[in-house]
Image (cartoon, helix red, strand yellow):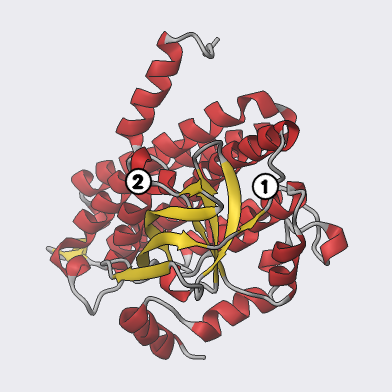
Amino acid sequence: MARTPIREQLEQSGWSEPLWTSVVDAGWLDVMLPQHLGGLGLGIGDVSGIFTAAGRYLLPGPLFDNAVAVPLAVGQATRDKHLTNLIAGRKRISLADGAASGQAGDSRPVVRDGRLFGSVDLVRLGGAADHFLVVVEEPEPTLVMADAGMPGVSLHRRRTFDSAAEHARIVFDGAEFEPLFENCKGDTARAAAVVAELRDAARLLFSCEIAGTARHLLDSAVLYAKEREQFGRPIGAFQAIQHLLATLATRQITLEAACEQGLNSWDSEPASRYVAATTAKAIAAEVGRVVGEGALQVHGGIAFTREFPLHRWHVHVLGLQGRYGDQHTIAAELGNLLVGKEFALW
């Protein structure tokens, strides 16, 4: 399908079925899927390039949810039959995790009397999902599956300026669910570990997506500075523009290095996953915004117009900035851990 119809679909509903079908057909959702389910059984480092490309080309859809969260869950769950059937049926699954948007803990999903209660705000592509992979906080962190069409599940779409990420608020009011882990001591600990790993992976891979988006913004700014002329010569010949682009390039390289470090240590140093992923996300949150603002500045007023698409990448960066914590939230989080001596930098 040509770009224009897809763009129109995204602007109207935040979703493009043909585009998502292409992602599925390309096998991107199978990279981390266990081999016994027909996947490649690879790891975070192998799938990271997809997220960088998704950011660079502004690919919409619940990519993390289906390409990472689902394989992580099904690879370690003890009650995975329902989830396995959904994977085989190519059902669209959205991750509903209140931590993604920094939602207050007392409003997040909980299980009471065998039913699911609570809500999750700002679920990416929640309105297009068939099922939800829900992070339940109480009584212990775990993962459950909920059918989007079941009684007790309601969703409220929330349009945003980011055409690549429509959001929805999902409310659970006594909804039935399918547990992925047994309610026993050993399985409870495993479920909590999976939730922690999932959140670390989200921070690291969203950092890769921001890096891809920021790289597109920087490259576009450099190209525009070479082509746009003012006073008889390209604006890139002016020292002020050169200094700005050099600063943006330095920040971009720092972000890409942080992502690479986090990916390299994911398997070799599992104990440092949290610190590496969290650090990368803090850098990505700041650098993505700075590079986006700088790219818009190089382009001037035209960058904000509807006819010039550059602002779409900048808005996408802003949408990902607070996903699982921005630089300020993460700085406070790491600072509290340092004060509590739960980890050391050296």
Residue that protrudes farthest toward the right in the picture: 36
Residue that protrudes farthest toward the front in the picture: 113
Q: Residue at the spot x=63%, y=74% of the render?
A: 91
Which residue is under mark 2? 107
* Residue 123 higher or lower than 5, as above or below: above
User: From the image, which quarter does the C terminus lie in?
Assistant: top right
Q: Residue at the spot x=80%, y=63% of the render?
A: 39
- Specify whether 159 is left or right of 74: left
Q: Earlier in the sequence, mark 1 or mark 2?
A: 1
From the image, state whether disc 1 or disc 2 is nearer to you: 2
Q: Of the residues shown, which amino acid type is indicated by label 1? A: Ile
Q: Is residue 120 visible?
A: yes
- Specify whether 132 is left or right of 104: right
**Which quadrant of the figure has residue 249?**
top left
* Residue 55 higher or lower than 332, as above or below: below
Which residue is under mark 1? 44
Q: CA distance from mark 1 to mark 2?
A: 31 Å
